[in-house]
Amino acid sequence: MATTAGAVLGQSKRQVGGAPSRPGVVLFIVCTAIFMLMLDATVVSAALADIRSDFDSSIDGLQWVIDAYALPLAGLLLTLGTAGDRFGRKRVFLCGMTVFTGASLALVLSGTILQLNALRAVQGVGAAMLFATALPLLAVAYPDARARAKAIGIYSAVMAAATVAGPVIGGALVTAFGWRSIFTINVPIGVVIFALALRRLPETPRHPDRRTDWLGSILLSGGLLAGVLGLTRGNSLGWTSLTIGILAATSAVLLTLFMVWQFRATHALFDVSMLRKPGFAGIAIIAVAHMATLMAASNYLAIFLINTMGFTPLQMGVRLVPLSIAALVAAPLGAVLAKRVPTAVSLPATMGLVVLGMWLLGGIDSTDSWIHFVPGMIIGGAGLGAITTVNQAAALTFASDENAGMASATFGTLRQVGMAVGVAGLGAMFSHRARDAAAHGLDAIQSAHNVTVTPDLRTQFLDGVAAGGGTNVVHAVPPEFASATPLLTDTAHTASIEGLNALFTLGTETALAATLVAAVFFAAGKWFATRRLG
């Protein structure tokens, strides 16, 4: 995520010293670490329903289970890549494995949703350290270009496999051992990988002249945090409330200051010269949009399959496999597309598959089974896989070999921004629509069936449905309302469907708008390039 093959090619030119005697051990260490980190980004979807139930969490709390992990990746990836150059990549990798493993152990012991989310943020910091140093470490282990290409191919396949396996492995663990097991499994693996890395990872040269832009990182992280916090709290506090206004203004100011600082900083996080190159804006928009729409929506689809359709976490994971398999199959096809078709055509076209996939996922009604989602998962998943490959290839056109790592990490950061914002924004839409539909359903029950719903029950019911509790919220209904259970179940089911459809509608509209705007930027970039050549 943090770097690509091109980044490694650029960085490897600066290496001094020989490769380790057994590079396969380095490849094993790096790939195992990355598999674990990618798994933690996707495996959590299988645990969200049980986490909500255990902690009686609101939708805000569930959103932060994902966003607390994504935000440190978005805010620190560029910074920690530079830190690896300055202090030594092995040292940063070992530090990252320590932080990640320690946070995983603490997550197993967390007692509240607040503790869980705070520790997920710590885990995300460790993940950023590992992502930022993984491929540069492979560059040292494989100085020969041909051998390095094969190693990077294995690395990429491991990342894809983790994405495919995440929901299934998570579902199996949660079903058999509970949600805490998805973090428990990291601990022994992390200890073994740390011990191997300590002994077998190559030492890399340090570049004390490379300075870390901590101010830029603070401004970027703070701006993203304020923006996502505003999105997650908008429904509960009111979108026109003073608090939400302050958060929105803070986010805008900090992100603006970040961009201003990047033009002034001597050792900036972001290579601002990329902004002047044709097509950068289009590629950046799609990097954010594909994560903010289908990838973010898949988490809510997982919750719906468990809490509303009644599947176990393992059954849910199996039913999400079409999306992952489609992405896995389409990724190598995207590599072919990137070589033969201009980026200005291939990226909008593949993003169009995401638009179509999102549209097909919506429109579910109460009589549909999970099969309704299969066409959308296949088409959308194919778009995701192709976009990932085409986007990474396009990222390398914006920097020299010397700055390829920065260019790649920039687009990796944009993808994490998309994930964080998408989870918050789509979750806010689901919560708002599901709550409204549930409220209308309760009013209809009271008027048509002469059932009195107490204020406490009403609040409990609406909060549960808005948090994605689906028909499971009825299990908490007091015994005196047992006669109304079928009616409440139907209401929760209908409200959850309406919330999910609203989420997919917003995702479709966002994806379509991003595709059209990106196409305009690509066209404008081509026009300006032609004018310049003329």
Image: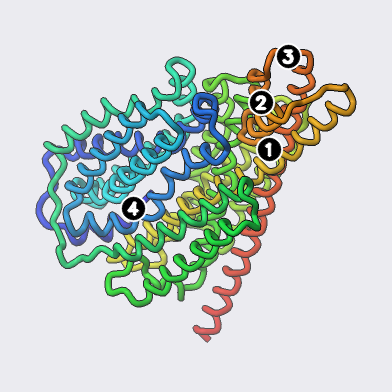
**Label 3, label 2: how far apart the Cα atoms are:** 23 Å
Residue situated furthest bottom in the rendering: 534
Compute the Cα span from label 2 to label 1: 11 Å
**Which residue matches tag 2?**
308
Name which of mark 1 and mark 4 comes first in the sequence: 4
* Disc 1 and disc 4 in contact, CB within 8 angstroms: no
- Mark 2, Cα crowd under 10 Å, few <14 / some 14-19 / many 20+, is many
Q: Which mark is first along the chain, 2 or 4?
A: 4
Position of 96 relative to 344 (above/below)? above
Report which residue position mark 4 lands on. Answer: 5
Q: Nearer the viewer, residue 152 or 110?
A: 110
The secondary element bearing badge 3 is classed as helix
| Residue 329 visible to the viewer | no
Please state which of the two labelled residues, at mark 1 or mark 4, is closer to the viewer: 1
Question: Residue flagged by tag 4: what amino acid is it?
Answer: Ala
> Which residue carries the number 3 mark?
480
